Amino acid sequence: MSETPRPPSAFLDATDALALLRSRSLQVGLIRRIAATPEWVRNDRVRAALVLHPRTPRPIAVGLLPQLRWRDLLKAATTPSLPAPIALGAVRLLAERSAEMSLGERITLARAAPEAILRTLRKDPSPLLLRALLDNPRFRAEDALFVAERAETPAASLQLLAESPRFRARADLRGLLAAHPSTPPQVALRLVAAMDEAETRRLLDQPATPPLVRLAAERRVSRG
């Protein structure tokens, strides 16, 4: 009487599955067996390795995405070799989960987030998070302008933008920051001092320009 074949998990554990998944040339049949073994896919690292493996069938990878930790979703969202549906699915899930993350987690995410996630994170009012965004090379001038235009942006964040080596030389950003009612007066006055005459006149044309800033701009124009 022959013995009933035992499942692969009876001989191997999640560590063995991870070792197999390190091979970029692993046969698709083996990948399917790993994904179909409950004892293995309950492991966070195995799930992530399956999603990130270039030979994992797309339906399996997409199905596992909602079970990934946010750091693994970030890897999926920023791995260039992954198919677009997997990367886009990871981006969507990250954007949804970002609201539930702690500030520390959002700050970590902000430093490495792809552009699609930046469009969500740039709405966060925390100056600490903005500082992390400014460290992200994907954070562009249009993102800085978006933050500067928002009425909800706090004074500390506006000062960060005004002092950013990447963006402080932009005339359009200087104008927005100088006219923003929450920009600290000393910061706004420094911005006016750096403006040429055309910038200063545009600032005077904005009805919302604070009185002190308007006065400084008028004096600068009058001096020619």
Image: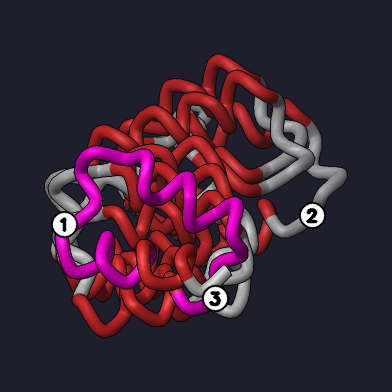
**From what the image shows, is residue 107 above or below residue 70?**
below
Q: Amino acid at mark 3?
A: Ala
Q: Quadrant of the C terminus?
A: bottom right
CA gap, disc 3 to disc 2? 57 Å
Q: Classify mark 3: residues with Cα within 10 Å, few (<14), some (14-19) or many (20+).
A: few
Residue 199 painted magenta: yes
Name which of mark 2 and mark 1 comes first in the sequence.
Answer: 2
Q: Secondary structure at mark 3?
A: loop
In the displayed structure, 133 sits above or below 142; it is below
Q: Is residue 153 left or right of residue 7?
A: left
Identify the mark at residue 194; answer none if there is no mark.
3
Disc 3 versus disc 2: nearer the observer: 3
**Residue 25, percent from left and from top:** 87, 44
Question: Disc 2, disc 1: CB below 8 Å?
Answer: no
Say which mark, if any, is on residue 181. Answer: 1
Residue depicted at 51% across the width and 74% down the height: 223
Disc 2: CA contacts within 10 A as few (<14), some (14-19) or many (>=20): few
Residue designated by label 2: 23
**Residue plotted at (33% across, 37% down):** 95
Q: Looking at the picture, which amino acid does disc 2 mark?
A: Ser
Going from N to C along the chain, the mark reached first, 3 or 2, is 2
Q: Is residue 82 visible?
A: yes
Per the rendering, the mark at residue 132 is none
Residue range in magenta is 193-217
Question: Cα distance, mark 1 to mark 3?
Answer: 19 Å
Q: Secondary structure at mark 1?
A: loop
Q: Position of residue 91 (x, y in %)?
A: 46, 34
